[in-house]
Image (cartoon, rainbow, N blue to C red):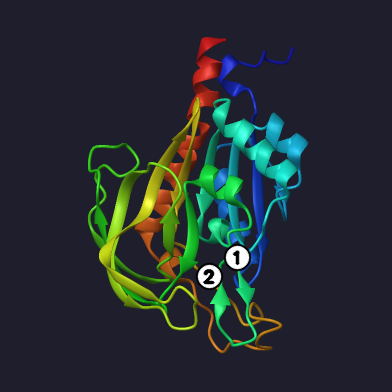
């Protein structure tokens, strides 16, 4: 006779959005799937964009690694409803980016999805060239950042405009120029790197680190990129932050199991 399933063995349904431009999405998708598979209860559906509104409405946690993927208004509303209704959304790196290349060669970041950016809590504006960054701990008591020591990483530093009140967990200091972008001059200030954005009964956790790029990922701008860039993905601390973020996102589903 088969054993009866215990309450804490219910499947945890995840939606992973992995798609977009100028990044090695194949690499990021695979790494995130491997991390999600460390918990055998997690069953993951994978999509390239946010238009899977029925799947988002039905999932226990939402995870995204995208660049320049703009949701339709219907999808933006579905994401907002998911989070406000108690869902947890772990957004990574370029999720808050919308890019447009102008005739003068500069990159603009138009405000074309304000509803989505308000849900995320920020909107990407520009980044300096990939270079070493020192990451500091802004909240040493929160479970996601507790015990994390300041560290250095070589990564794209996403400079974003806040769109909501943020609970900053990790941050860094930057001031200077970001060549190639319309929004290219920044006064010295501290910038969120990992933050929480509470919304209704749920929340968004944003981790801006994690650029990755392979040989073919700048097409059609460039046919071949000479290096394979893994940035923060080469650091154990980054994987620790990813695991903690996924545990945070799963927590309400696990708590509901305990109450069954």
Give how far across and how far down residue 245 sits, in percent: 45, 43
Give how far across and how far down residue 60 sits, in percent: 61, 31
Answer with mark 1 or mark 2, whichever residue precedes in sequence.
1
Q: In which quarter of the image is residue 160?
A: bottom left
Q: Which residue is drawn at 49% across and 78% down?
A: 181
Q: Count the marks.
A: 2
Q: Nearer the viewer, residue 85 or 209?
A: 85
**For the residues carrying marks 1 and 2, which lies nearer the camera in this image?**
2
Q: Is residue 37 among what the camera can see?
A: no
The dot on residue 212 is 2
On screen, residue 5 versus residue 203, left or right, reads right
Q: Which residue is drawn at 72% across and 15% down?
A: 2
The dot on residue 72 is none
On screen, residue 157 versus residue 47, left or right, reads left
Assign a secondary structure to mark 2: loop
Image quadrant holding the C terminus, namely: top right
Q: Name the residue tied to disc 1.
A: 27
Q: In this view, does 253 lie above or below 134?
A: above
Give how far across and how far down residue 231 sits, in percent: 44, 71
On screen, residue 7 versus residue 179, left or right, reads right
Q: Quadrant of residue 189?
A: bottom left
Give how far across and how far down residue 4 sits, in percent: 67, 13
Q: Residues within 10 Å of mark 1 (few under 14, many from 20)?
A: some
Q: Nearer the viewer, residue 7 or 50?
A: 50
Residues under labels 1 and 2: Cα distance?
Answer: 8 Å
> Do tag 1 and tag 2 residues touch (Cβ < 8 Å)?
yes
Q: How crowded is mark 2: few (under 14 residues within 10 Å), some or many (20 or more)?
A: many
Q: Which residue is drawn at 67% across and 60% down?
A: 19
């Amino acid at each position: 006779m088969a054993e009866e399933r215990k309450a804490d063995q219910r499947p945890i349904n995840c939606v992973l959005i992995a798609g977009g431009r100028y990044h090695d999405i194949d690499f990021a998708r695979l790494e995130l799937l491997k991390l999600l598979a460390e918990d055998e209860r997690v069953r993951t559906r994978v999509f390239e964009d946010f238009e899977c509104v029925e799947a988002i409405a039905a999932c226990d946690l939402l995870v995204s690694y995208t660049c320049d993927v703009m949701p339709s208004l219907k999808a933006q509303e579905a994401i907002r409803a998911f989070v406000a209704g108690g869902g947890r959304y772990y957004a990574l790196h370029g999720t808050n980016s919308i890019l447009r290349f102008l005739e003068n060669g500069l990159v603009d970041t138009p405000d074309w999805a304000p509803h989505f950016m308000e849900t995320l809590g920020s909107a990407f504006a520009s980044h300096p060239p990939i270079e070493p960054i020192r990451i500091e701990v802004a909240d040493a008591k929160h479970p996601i950042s507790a015990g994390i020591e300041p560290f250095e990483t070589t990564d794209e530093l996403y400079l974003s405009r806040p769109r909501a009140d943020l609970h900053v967990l990790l941050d860094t200091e930057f001031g200077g120029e970001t060549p190639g972008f319309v929004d290219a001059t920044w006064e010295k200030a501290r910038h969120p790197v990992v933050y929480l954005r509470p919304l209704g009964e749920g929340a968004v956790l944003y981790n801006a680190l994690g650029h990755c790029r392979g040989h073919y990922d700048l097409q059609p701008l460039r046919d071949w990129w000479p290096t394979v860039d893994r940035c923060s993905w080469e650091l154990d601390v980054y994987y620790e932050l990813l695991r903690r973020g996924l545990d945070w996102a799963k927590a309400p589903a696990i708590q509901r199991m305990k109450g069954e």
